[in-house]
Amino acid sequence: MSDRNFHQQLRSILETEPVVIATIVKVIGSAPREVGAKMAICADGSIIGTIGGGAGEGKVIKQALKVLTTGEKQLVEINLTGTPGKDIQGVCGGKVQVWLETWAGVETIALIDRIMELFQTGQSGKLVTPFTQDTQPYLICEYGRFANRPYIFIETIQPPPCLLIIGGGHVAVSLAEVASFAGFEIAVQDDRPEFVTPQRFPQAGFLFESMGETLNKFATYQQLYIALVTRGLTQDIAALQAILQSSLAFQYIGAIGSHKRIRMIHQTIQQQGISLEELPNFYAPIGLDIGALTPQEIAVSICAELIKVRRGGTGLSLREPARCGSMTR
């Protein structure tokens, strides 16, 4: 579930009832979810999101229902080491600390609205959660003045990453589906109207024919990923020129094609005074080498590279010694 969907569902529920928010505030060793992962627990025991599943999550739900009754915030530790004689909730190898507090009322709804505004504009902010009974979470734009205070938890609220797919062909259709499943918002641009329709791209939140309109839309986005999967070299070069001459702050840009096609892109762009060698986040040919052949396999290859760049992975097989046991963080 994306952060946007989580907050949308949370806001809807808060219109009628309070919930307890469980937030992972510390991880020691390996754990199924990362610091900042959230889950909302309702009075009937139903949940939105997850902090990892299993018996550990069950313990948190049980404690959350008590918090919902008493209103007393608390810190819960989940032991995932599998150590004999301990309160064992799993065998991932680490420990997780989870902060539980009730979210309710118009002020909380207003806070969620502010977070949703960040998502809408592609901006980020800081959510401060004080570890005190009488202070509620709040959103700020600055971080440094809170850095050394041990009695608060600060997390970065970021919009979900957006994948801008340039080109509406077969690979684009499969990539939109796979990347949406992986948590990316989807936007597609193609100058052919029949290739950018809701029927063809049901996952897409944005569909464009005009490159200029596309660039204007994402001018403020901080988590933008771009995949050039166009129908030809001419379209690749035109799109790349427009993007590099804009002010887009993209995390990743990749281009599909053979090594020969990519060399031609480099040569053409370089002739115009733009060196792609100086662009560290240009990935071409796009994707990881998994032997992909079909559009669906190519989409998986591209999405794997997107996740690698986003999460900081190596792209190696998890059976490699250097990565053994690191599937969870």
Image: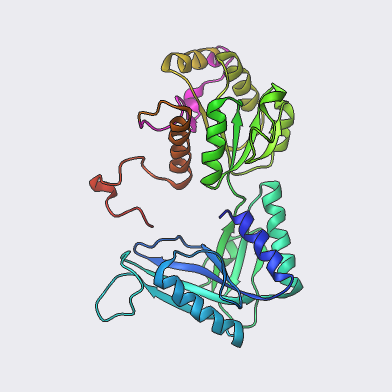
Q: Position of residue 119 (x, y in %)?
A: 67, 51
Q: Position of residue 199 (x, y in %)?
A: 67, 34
Residue 151 seen in render: no
Q: Which of 152 and 295 lies nearest the eye of the viewer?
A: 295
Q: Position of residue 177 (x, y in %)?
A: 55, 39
Q: Is residue 88 left or right of residue 300?
A: left
Q: Position of residue 320 (x, y in %)?
A: 25, 44
Q: How many marks?
A: 0
Name the colour scheme: rainbow
Quadrant containing the C terminus is bottom left
Quadrant containing the N terminus is bottom right
At a point 40% along the width and 61% down the height, the residue shown is: 32
At a point 43% along the width and 13% down the height, the residue shown is: 260
Residue reaching furthest bottom? 70
Q: Tell me where residue 217 sits by quadrant.
A: top right
At a point 58% along the width and 17% down the height, the residue shown is: 237
At a point 28% along the width and 71% down the height, the residue shown is: 82
Q: Tell me where residue 111 sits by quadrant.
A: bottom right
What is the magenta segment's predominant secondary structure? Answer: loop
**Membership of 62 in magenta stretch:** no
Q: Tell me where residue 161 sits by quadrant.
A: top right
In the rendered image of this protein, does residue 53 appear above or below residue 211?
below
**Membership of 271 in magenta stretch:** yes
Residue 298 seen in render: yes
Q: Which range of residues does the magenta coloring cover?
A: 269-290
In the rendered image of this protein, does residue 271 appear above or below residue 146?
above
Residue reaching furthest front? 199
